[in-house]
């Protein structure tokens, strides 16, 4: 996926109530994600969700599971938000963060499943040390 800068994406994300973009706000949810969702359904996360097609499809098909999409880039996350705002469910939240900080945000045994679909690939042999 080619990244293109989307003007106003950071402001759009900051103003959206379904996105936790502040690192302190994200860390404060550790062990308390069920309170944010308002239920005790299992939590599944997708790391590097891109434009959100996969996680949105899962959320629609499984309303009894809470989903959290993690994306590093604002320009991509804003496209997922566009899809989200056409969705009528309430079982999804988004995090704008680098997945390297994931242990600071989720408690042990808090997440039931992690989806990792082609997130930030380094396909060339010379990139092997970065994978």
Image (spheres, helix red, strand yellow):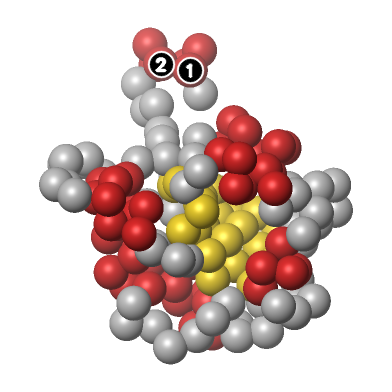
Residue 35's x, y, as percent? 74, 69
Q: How far is the residue under mark 2 from the one under mark 1?
A: 5 Å
Most foreground residue, 117 or 21? 21
Circle 1 residue: 130
Check residue 127 in the rendering and tell me which mark sits there, or answer none: 2
Give the answer, above or below, for where 37 lies relative to 23. below
* The residue positioned farthest toward the right in the image shown: 109
Residue 131's x, y, as percent? 51, 23
Relative placement, left or right, of 68 versus 11 is right
For the N terminus, the quadrant is top left
| Snapshot quadrant of residue 46 | bottom right
What number of labels is visible? Answer: 2
Please give the name of the residue rendered at 80% of the width and 47% of the height, measured from the top-left corner.
Answer: 107
Please give the name of the residue rendered at 16% of the width and 41% of the height, measured from the top-left corner.
Answer: 4
Please give the name of the residue rendered at 85% of the width and 47% of the height, measured from the top-left corner.
Answer: 108
Residue 113's x, y, as percent? 71, 59
Element type at mark 2: helix
Residue 25's x, y, as percent? 60, 47
Q: Tell me if label 2 and label 1 are in contact, CB under 8 Å.
A: yes
Please give the name of the residue rendered at 38% of the width and 73% of the height, measured from the top-left corner.
Answer: 84
């Amino acid at each position: 996926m080619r990244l293109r800068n989307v003007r106003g994406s950071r402001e759009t994300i900051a103003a959206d109530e379904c996105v936790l973009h502040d690192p302190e706000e994200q860390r404060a949810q550790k062990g308390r994600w069920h309170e944010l969702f308002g239920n005790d359904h299992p939590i599944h996360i997708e790391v590097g969700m891109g434009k959100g097609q996969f996680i949105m499809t899962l959320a629609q098909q499984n309303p009894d599971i809470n989903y959290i999409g993690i994306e590093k880039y604002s320009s991509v996350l804003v496209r997922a938000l566009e899809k989200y705002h056409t969705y009528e469910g309430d079982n999804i939240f988004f995090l704008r963060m680098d997945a390297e900080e994931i242990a600071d945000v989720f408690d042990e045994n808090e997440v039931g499943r992690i989806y990792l679909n082609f997130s930030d690939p380094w396909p060339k042999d010379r990139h092997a040390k970065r994978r």
